[in-house]
Image (cartoon, rainbow, N blue to C red):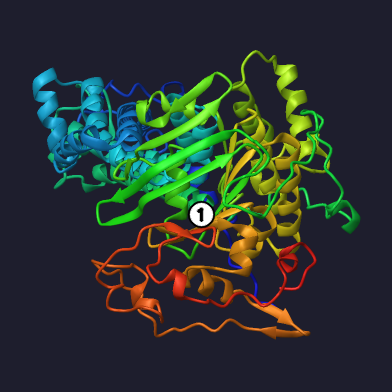
Amino acid sequence: MSAPEAPTARESPIVKIAWGLILLLVGVAILGPWLSPHDPNLGDFSKIMVGPSSENWLGTDNLGRDTLSRLMVGTRIAALAGLEATAIAIAVGVPIGITVGFLGGALDRLVMRVVDAVAAIPALVFAIAIIAAIGGGLTQAMIAVGLAFSASVARLARGLTLSERERLYVDGARVVGLGRSSLLLRHILPNIGGPLVVIATTVFAQAIVTEAGLSFIGLGVEIPDASWGSMLTNAQRVHRDNPFQSVPPGVAIFITVLAINIVGDSLLRRRRGESFDHPAGHLEPVIARSKDVDAPIVDPIAQPMTNLDRTAAGADWAGGASRVLTVRSLSVNYPTTTAVLSADFHVDEGEVVALVGESGSGKTSAVMAVAALLTPPADVRAAELSLATPSGDMSLLDMSRSEQRRWRSQLGVVFQEPAASLNPLQTVGRQMADALKRVGGMSRREISDRTIELLTAVGLPRPAEVARLRPDQISGGMAQRVVIAQALASEPRLLIADEPTTALDVTIQAEIITLLKQLGEQRGLAVLLVTHDLGVAAELADRTLVMYQGRVVERAPMAGLVTAPQHPYASELLLSVPRNVGGVRIEPKIDRSASLAVPTAGCVYAPRCEHATPECREREPVLRNVRSHLVACIHAEELDLPAIPVEPSAFEPGGER
């Protein structure tokens, strides 16, 4: 018998009581002036400091005024003070925080120094200083309190934005052409809204306490208006004779702040998913029949192209296809490391070029540089980074950051984590519409129809239903198909696929591989593929670049690489693939004692290479032609390296590995 589940924040009696108290206080704040049994400012000198009675339930103060009536009117003052201060703190702090967090750079550093200085001053002291400059009164006091708390709100909003802007769905939105304002208002702000609501409850509670403190010292509400703070001031004067006078306002402040904090904590728990059930309307994945996996996908948008002739011989694409992407001497540097060093490659129309290598080899940095998705502190440099488009060639090197949207309009990007690539708060249809709006000239009806066509083209069942769902309501394989459809929406010249099958199970991997192959052939796409899985590369790629520590160490046709690698690292990659031989699974032999250190001179692979000589540790090799491969190894002609002892066809779907 399983143990009973702990009560969630939503089910907790304490939270329900807190919500009830807040609703009661809201009602009193709204209706208090009409419900109060006496005039809160009218005193009866015959009833000075009388105790609780049937006529005065909480007694009277030192001027004979009814304590309950003043407490009820003070509730409205506390609510207004909290609302005004919270609204000002959010209105000032959130725009500052999300803007500098998103833009970064010198503006971020300058603004945050000012924000840190303001946040270091206690809110009450800061409020007193502002009141001294602009005058007293409740409104002025709450402006001061709101400005004081806006620094904390700005710091939180900045931190959340810094985290959120690095998520894949933001890069995906940038690829489909959304500008900065749309990214901030439609993508980032809704996704950080939960924590901002939580801090708003904290600011609200602190504002009530701060207003009470200011009124206590005479800088809040004006006499004779009632507030909880001014009631405490009056109670202090008669504390020796009637200590009960401090109890009603003190208890009111305590209960109100406690209830707000409990509700804020419950909202935080909900944000973390502790009290949510499985989302309603979840669409279970529909597994295609095996015969459907290999069946050609009918693309209702584009005219099917004839299957391009792919040849395994030679290092370049054969068949006269035009050049789409040209990259020369690409380097990507970070403050502490070089991710890519002087990489050269190109992709032709209808061709798939794969970048392979282990984690940290620089594959993703290279393609993200091509997609113009790297931001400071990344430093991207190249001798040439150009893209051929129907309207003429364009160079990324000549573009400012604002002009890079035009470059990305010619690209489609498929990221390795399909669920993270989509905004969790927007439906699939909404995100597809963002991608289609970049094309321009389409009505809402045409965008809706085109969305259904694209979702159908990538093999999604019930596309109209999928379009109405959020990413968390569909499976990982379906999400990846949605990402592919989104990437194809603007009819890009180049499709970048960054580990498109990594997060998927084996069955779905096969379907996605088949889908990419068929879409590439039908549309004549140039595809730049990143993968550490040589099996995926063998099934999709025409040419392959093997990368190690940011360097391209071998460039060759895929079939040639599989059967006859010319660089020791390429051979090691091939032998690291588990395979079946004669019904027996052969596990890779991995030398765990090999050094992973990056030398400061010579060949970067020398510390791990069993063929390395002293010359390798002194002279850095350059790419040169060896047996129709381009290889960065000074001993390449002398080596006879092992490869996978099977035919290249074993890498085709259904073959043994």
Is residue 231 visible to us here? no
Q: How many marks?
A: 1
| Quarter-of-image position of residue 433 | top right
Q: Look at the numbered disc 1 and give the secondary structure of its residue.
A: loop
- Residue tagged by mark 1? 272
Task: Report the quarter where the C terminus lies.
Answer: bottom right
* Amino acid on which disc 1 is placed: Arg
Towards the viewer: 258 or 592? 592
Question: Horizontally, is 313 left or right of 101 in the view?
Answer: right
Task: Report the quarter where the N terminus lies.
Answer: bottom right
Towards the viewer: 243 or 105? 105
**Position of residue 332 measured from the top left corner of the image (x, y, whole percent):** 34, 48
Towards the viewer: 131 or 562? 562
- Mark 1 residue crowding within 10 angstroms, few (<14) / some (14–19) / many (20+): few
Question: Horizontally, is 97 left or right of 19 in the view?
Answer: left
Is residue 90 visible to us here? yes
Question: Horizontally, is 595 left or right of 554 in the view?
Answer: left
Task: Please name the residue shown 58% across and 81% down the image.
Answer: 588
**Position of residue 18 measured from the top left corner of the image (x, y, whole percent):** 48, 48
Task: Please name the residue shown 78% across and 52% down the image.
Answer: 284
Task: Please name the residue shown 29% across and 34% down the image.
Answer: 100
Towards the viewer: 8 or 345? 345
Task: Please name the residue shown 75% across and 62% down the image.
Answer: 652
**Position of residue 507 measured from the top left corner of the image (x, y, whole percent):** 76, 62
**Position of residue 25 measured from the top left corner of the image (x, y, whole percent):** 45, 36
Where 170 falls versus 415 (above or below)? above
